[in-house]
Image (tube, rainbow, N blue to C red):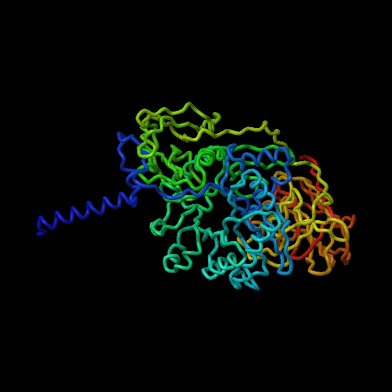
Amino acid sequence: MVSLHVLTAVVFLYCLVFSWALKSNIFHFEVQDFLKDDQDTISFDDSHGLGRVFEGIGAISGGGATSKLLVNYPKKQRDEILDYLFKPGFGASLQIFKVEIGGDIQSTDGTEASHMHNSWEENYHRGYEWWLMQEAKKRNPNIKLYGLPWGFPGWLGKGTHNPYIDPVQTADYVVNWIKGAKSVYNLTIDYVGIWNERPYNITYIKILRQTLDQNGFQNTVIIAPDDFGWKLVTDIQKDKDLDNMIHAIGAHYPGTKSAWKAKQSKKPLWASEDYSTFNDEVGGGCWARILNQNYVNGFMTSTISWNLIGSYYPSLPFPRNGLMTAMQPWSGHYVVSTPIWVSAHTTQFVPVGWTYLQHNHGVGKLPKGGSYVSLTNEAKDQLTIVIETMSHDHSICVRPKLHPYKVAPQTVTISLQGSFKNIDKLNVWHSKLLYNGSQSQMFMQQKPLILENGQAQLTLGLDEVYTLTTFSKGKKGTHPKPQEPAPFPSYIKDDFSAYEEYQEPFYIAPQIGSYEVRKVDGQNVMRQTVLQRPIYWCKSETADKTISVIGSFNWTETKISVEFEIPAVNGTDGVFVAARVDRGGCHSNDAQGVFFFVFPITGKFMVTNDLARTKVLHQGSVPIGLGKHQMSLDVTKTKAEGCYDLKQTFSIDLPATPQNGWAALGTDSFGLADFHSYTLQVPHA
């Protein structure tokens, strides 16, 4: 039998270890689950030490083309939208702005242009992320900027699908983008990533760090891996040099949890992409829950939303997955969604650089469900507390699966101790998310919470967010009500004469390939510029065709016409126009619809039911020859007619499906094609 002395020693040792574990926060989230209903006093006390440093809340433009339609909003409405996103003390007051380093690849809702389509050229006027970063900095000079590639131009792979085949070349490519940001726009990139949700390469990370340093960007730090999970921690533990080269471990959609080894690494932990949820009240609840619990459960000090703003055609993947929505530049209509005000509960009252209090002394779970965090400044004379009580069904994010839990109304006692015990009032901001058709009450200032001897009671309902703060500032910014929504215009003609060179034309939403305005023989054209299959992020580019969609997904009857020319050098094999295109995004290669292809070099045409040209509806001959040509496709309820150089080429009955979809134009292969104009008509918009 075990002696009494041995048993006593074992019990003592067990208690000692368990006590140490509690103080070290090893079991912090389990402990909170054991709190009894009558333990309703929540203590905020810095005398136990402080936690980790808060590094900011942000959002992503890109991954991909998620801000496409914002660019051509009327200036008044566009400025209002940007205020809600970036202006400090007005709306979301974002602290980090992450953008895609365009790679000429499909990265969810479209492609974004590379600054180097080819190895022999550089250009820093393509796309709209430069402009957006400028607008963010104009409103908030302190906002941090973060660049991340989703894919890369094909030339970097040297015949492979591997951007690390020549890590020096790829590092130079990325650092060129950072240099361009600084030299052309005076934008300092604070953070840079590796390859979004794709394998990282340790050699490349080290070379990227060296290349940054060699070019004077010692203060641009690396966030890695920007992928799912925490595998990088193992590599960091084995490689001190790698550890020193990475500022923070960035995980995607962590579900508020981080691996034990990640917490023990002492590295800053980030949810470097999160949210990705439809921005109704449930989306707002998701955002509220993870903003708190990413730290409560996972010790993550930064959370970044994909995406910044749902500003892409609504039938593309993940509609309304931004902090707000702006899908109608033609009408000026936009919607300030609940995640804007959920963000404000933290960002307007917690500057980057503040520090969390310790778990169980200012960070934890509420007795009857929900969570709280608190942060203070270096002098410890300011305090902000953020509380959320999101119920399970009203805070489900798109990923990962949210396991069942319960939240109940409760009254808690707020107890301020340590440096905060003499605070006699806290300013109060409150949101109540409603789901029964009633209007949610978002970010409303209430009467201050008066404390006596450092204590006060607070009654919490379901699906609420409270900010209690010593900050006297804070504002629910407002602009005049935006215009009412309207259908996409029934007639558009664009000869591209109004654009600056290298701009991406309005309404044209590239899904494969990259389209930009170029000057040819003194006149503007829209050129498809990608010459080879890129190092893609998803498999749409395996079609080896390019396509841009335009207009409304609901259209059944459409007439689209273009004037085009295929250059003799590096030209594409053919050009098409299309109607009833039924999909975009990462499934663009599988698009169905009515496609009219013309091949001027071989003198052939083809009408197909799919982009891949596997379902041929009709085919024939056209005159051979390069030079400028016209082509049009007119789709009515049951028929399609096509013309080439003003002569009817075909008239056919249509298949049963698809019955509706976007208009589109594109090329049969990667290679140059110049579009001099396009015209779009919809008889019954």
Position of residue 385 relative to residue 659, above or below, is above
Residue 588, position as x, y percentages in the image: 66, 57
**Residue at 70% over, 36% down:** 485
Q: How many marks?
A: 0
Residue 516, position as x, y percentages in the image: 76, 56
Q: Quadrant of the C terminus?
A: top right
Left or right position of 262 against 611? left
> Which residue ends up furthest to the top in the rendered image?
447
Left or right position of 100 against 671? left
Q: 216 or 29: which is nearer to us? A: 216
Residue 676 visible in rendering: yes
**Residue at 52% over, 44% down:** 351
Left or right position of 289 against 548? left
Residue 175: image quadrant is: bottom right
**Residue at 43% over, 54% down:** 258
Q: 176 or 201: which is nearer to us? A: 176
Q: 68 or 429: which is nearer to us? A: 429
**Residue at 43% over, 31% down:** 461
